Amino acid sequence: MSEAGLPRGSGTFQMPAPPGILRLLGALLYDSLLIIALLMIAALPWVMLTAQPDTEGLDFTPKGLGFQLYCLALIIAYYIVQWSIQGQTLGMKSWRLLLINVSGQRGIHPLRGLLRFVTAPLSWLPAGLGVLWQYTDSEGLMWHDRISATRVVITSKRRKNSYRTL
């Protein structure tokens, strides 16, 4: 079997059922905690380089658009690098989720990752309608999956360093 559940040599690709909303939220929460830790560590050099003296000593509060863009760039890099190389972030790995492209291969092109990152909030913001859409979509895709030509699948438990989808 291929990485995403396609029997080797078969011409048809059978997609597994989409992951549930609780599993997606669990992975998102886990990744959020990791990103908070990453930003805390990454903010230290910025703060040390930009600390300004004021009347009460040094002001260590990060300020300005530059810092916000720096943090956003780190978050985008976290997702794109993880999706491109491994096909999953650490949160996704913990919840046994895998991001695949339309042909069922693990990992996606960085530009597809950027498109997915930019369009994902569109799925979550209108009361999660774009995420819940997967239950009505004929292929089980969320809005940002359809736009970026990717999909999230559930992987089976790890056996001898191999992943297979359910």
Image (cartoon, rainbow, N blue to C red):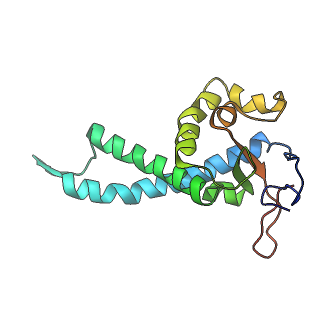
Residue at 52% x, 55% y is 81
Q: Is residue 116 left or right of residue 18?
A: left
Residue, far left: 55
Give percent across and percent down for residue 26.
69, 49
Q: Residue at x 84, y 45 (%)?
A: 15
Residue 10 at x, y = what percent?
A: 90, 54
Which residue is painted at 71% across and 45% down in the image? 24
Height in image: 133 above or below 11?
above
Extreme residue in the bottom direction: 160
**Number of numbered discs:** 0
Residue positioned most to the top: 126
Quadrant holding the C terminus: bottom right
Of the pair 101 and 47, the residue shown nearer to us: 101
For the N terminus, which image quadrant? bottom right
Q: Decide which of 87, 60 is in the foreground and name it.
A: 87
Q: Residue at x 83, y 31 (%)?
A: 135
Locate residue 156: give its quadrant. Answer: bottom right
